[in-house]
Amino acid sequence: MQIINLIQHTRFSTAIAADRGSVGNSESYRCRCLNVCSQIFELELWSCRFYQHRKLRIQNWLLLVTMLALAIFVVIAIYSATSSRSDPYAADFWRKQANWVAVGIFAFMVTSLIHYRWIRWGALPMYLAGIVFLILTKFIGTKVYGARSWLHLGPINFQPAQLAVVAGIMVLAIFLTQFREMHPMLRLLLSGAIAGAPCLLILMQPDLGEVIIWIPVLLALWFVGGLPLRYLICVILIAIAFIPIAINFGLKPYQQQRITAFTHPDIDKQGSAWAINQSLIAIGSGGWSGKGFKAANTQIELGFLPATAVHNDYIFSAIGEQWGFVGGILLIGGFAVLLMTCLFVAFFAGDQLGLLLAVGITALIFTHIFQNMGMTIALLPITGVPLPLISYSGSFVLMIMFGLGLVNSVWIHRKIPE
């Protein structure tokens, strides 16, 4: 029907052009022209709506459904993990998480419909805002677990490090795309400076976990961005050489105790190794199918797992205890589907910028998953890194869903011009 209308509009405007010489009344002629223009405008408006509807239809539904499934699951998991606690503030965690999930879904959809190439206009302001917030955190931030990493701005409480990391990925993707002809060493140094500025500020908090997150993300962007492999190998070897120096001279005493608890968990079971051992006990006691939803007499209810962190850093321990091996495997499987979908989008990206954005966000999510789950099962030292879409953290959920929105935008616009 719309095509027929288009043909009619074309014929009508042609007839006007043919009759122009025979029309004596100029007012009548102007009215007819305005009528044609208004109809053409309506057609253009319909085309824009059709364009947006097409975007909704061709989005990556597997990515959206997997993200929603994980987000719904976490609300249930947080409710189950905190319902047995006497603290009334903790009983409200699942509602707050649900609200942040709703905001995150909105951010995901808006970001998906905007062409990802438009981030060239917003990436740098976001990056600079993250730097400014990190500087403010140093002076007016709130200290939690020994790190001054939280910033209160009115009713909003968030971690600027998470904004800086996502914005940093965007800026790095733009830089590596636009300066492909630059000398590899100069690209390496300048991109390292882009990543190093927020890393240095995060390290001053100190929040070692978020700094560690940057390393595999930056390496992935360098590799996909076309930097020679020999440069990457040199960077990795230099980083490995500095690890003993950093552990002995660069870490705070409590951070060194965490590493000691990781390497020798039997030395101080009642002290620095307490959290690791209780996490292992909680996961192991869940057995095959877990103790059940809102189960009683759990490590969570009895207070053996840190009550202040069971809903965020140790949420996987709570899931392992209440949902068992089956629940843990289903969660890992959901993450695997999410990551593989993001890599699939990266493979079919329309240009280098889309490829780098998808790879950067995928590396960010994977590193968080690996580090969080690794520390709860004693494969890695405790670093306080949240589990994407699962841990209780409003700003982190929002940033991850925003990043996934960028990935979805890469998929939607892979064949659509800017």
Image: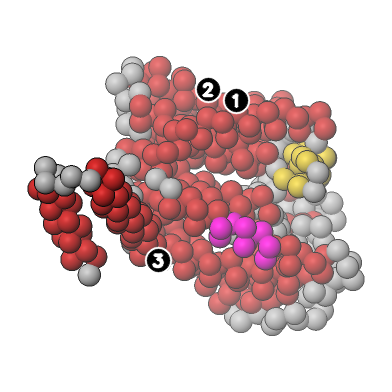
- From where the camera sits, is residue 130 visible? yes
* Residue 115 place in picture, x, y as percent: 39, 45
Of residues 380 and 400, the one drawn nearer to the viewer in this rendering: 400
Query: Mark 3 belongs to which amino acid?
Result: Trp
The structure residue drawn at horizontal position 18% and vertical position 66%, both measured from the top left corner, is 4
Label 2–label 1 contact, CB within 8 A: yes
Residue at image point 81% right, 44% down? 154
Residue 238: percent from left, percent from top:
50, 25
Q: Which residues are magenta?
A: 98-106
Image quarter in which the N terminus is found: bottom left
- Which residue in the structure is indicated by mark 3? 61
Disc 3 residue crowd, few under 14, some 14–19, many 20+, Cα 10 Å: few
Q: Is residue 102 magenta?
A: yes
The answer to whether residue 255 is above or below residue 399 is above
Q: Earlier in the sequence, mark 3 or mark 1?
A: 3
Q: Is residue 266 visible?
A: no
Quarter that holds the C terminus: top left
Q: From the viewer's perspective, is residue 125 above or below residue 351?
A: above
Which residue, given by chain and number where applicable, does mark 2 sit on? 193
**Left or right of 316: which side holds 206?**
right
Q: Is residue 274 left or right of residue 78?
A: right
Q: Is residue 138 placed above or below 85 in the rendered structure?
A: above
